Amino acid sequence: VAIHVVNGPNLNLLGRREPQTYGSLTLADIEQRLNDRATARGGVALTFRQSNSEGDLVTFIQEAGIAGAGIILNAAAYTHTSIALRDAIKSVDALAIEVHLSNVHAREDFRHHSTIAAVAIGVICGFGAASYDLAFDALVPILEKRDS
Ligand code: DQA
């Protein structure tokens, strides 16, 4: 099975960006954790993509969906505003899990709403880098079942 890990705006700055909220790991560190997990699990191909631009993220989602890859998606601030990302998931029937490092529900009101959650399989937030690991563990069996 294949999984695309898609990260949105400002997540390229993880490690130096508001570490009290997002932790001290860099995006490369998070990717390394997932690579280790995939190696231990076997049979999972990971692709990592990040952009600060909404349009790029639309393209990444389309490409993942068309390739039949599942998506671990941290759309960052676009989570709260983007109809285009929601439509992209729907357009290609992508199997996506929405993730956030922080517990968005414990933060400002404008982070409580997601345009994406309703078209995602589910949402994992508040566990730091482990949010991605939990999404990986949830998504792999769903993709294996679909492909069997
Ligand atoms: C985030 C939460 C968003 O509200 C915020 O805009 C981000 C990061 C998270 O991973 O906790 O950029 O998606």
Image (cartoon, helix red, strand yellow):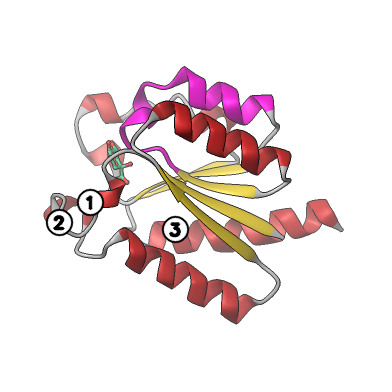
Q: Could you give the CA–CA distance between mark 1 and mark 3, rounded to whole angstroms?
A: 17 Å
Query: Percent position (x, y) of residue 35?
Result: 50, 71
Q: Secondary structure at mark 2?
A: loop
Identify which amino acid the numbered label 1 is placed on: Leu
Residue 109 placement: quadrant: top left
Q: Is residue 110 above or below residue 64?
A: above
Label of residue 107 in the image: none
**N-terminal of the two: label 2 or label 3?**
2
Determine which residue is flagged by label 2: 16
Farthest top residue in view? 83
Q: Secondary structure at mark 1?
A: helix
**N-terminal of the two: label 1 or label 3?**
1
Query: Percent position (x, y) of residue 62?
Result: 62, 34
* 124 left or right, relative to 47: left
**Quarter of the render that holds ligand 1:** top left
Determine which residue is flagged by label 1: 13
Specify the quadrant that holds the N terminus: bottom right
Chief secondary structure of the magenta portion: helix
Identify which amino acid the numbered label 3 is placed on: Tyr
Determine which residue is flagged by label 3: 132
